[in-house]
Image: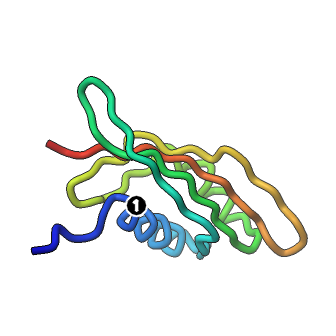
Amino acid sequence: MSRGPDAATQLERALLAAAAAAGCPVAIATADWTRWTSATFTGARHALTLVAPPSPMLDCWLVGLNEAEFALRGYLVADIDVVRMTREGDTVTVALEALTVEER
């Protein structure tokens, strides 16, 4: 029996949906994750690269991203940050890092 999508898949889907809802559709160019644990939590660190056309809606969405709530089944997004953004012609490339933790 399958447990359903993992945290990485759910996070990618949630980011795509949130960007589309904000009027700034993005595409995921790269995505990777590694397991992470602390004394009290288990989860994963995620590194994603998004690409999108430049727009004021994209800028607004990115500014509020670290305060956004994402509904992931079985996981919480504990932290998400824009670590780098470049603008080249008609493309904005955004590097994100996120931390998800398993709900218990």
Of all residues shown, which one is farthest toward the top? 39
Three-letter residue code for mark 1 = Ala
**Of 74 and 22, the residue lying toward us:** 74
x and y percentages locating residue 73 in the rendered image = 23, 60
Q: Is residue 35 left or right of residue 2?
A: right
The residue at the point 45 percent across, 45 percent down is: 45
The residue at the point 45 percent across, 40 percent down is: 79
Q: How many marks?
A: 1
For disc 1, the marked residue is: 8
x and y percentages locating residue 26 in the rendered image = 61, 73
Q: Is residue 2 left or right of residue 10?
A: left
Which image quarter holds the N terminus? bottom left
Tell me: residue 40, above or below residue 78.
above
Q: Is residue 39 left or right of residue 94?
A: left
Q: Is residue 37 left or right of residue 96?
A: left
The residue at the point 33 percent across, 34 percent down is: 37
x and y percentages locating residue 8 in the rendered image = 40, 61
Of all residues shown, which one is farthest toward the left? 1
**Of 18 and 95, the residue lying toward us:** 95
The residue at the point 66 percent across, 54 percent down is: 95
Q: Secondary structure at mark 1?
A: helix
x and y percentages locating residue 24 in the rendered image = 61, 72
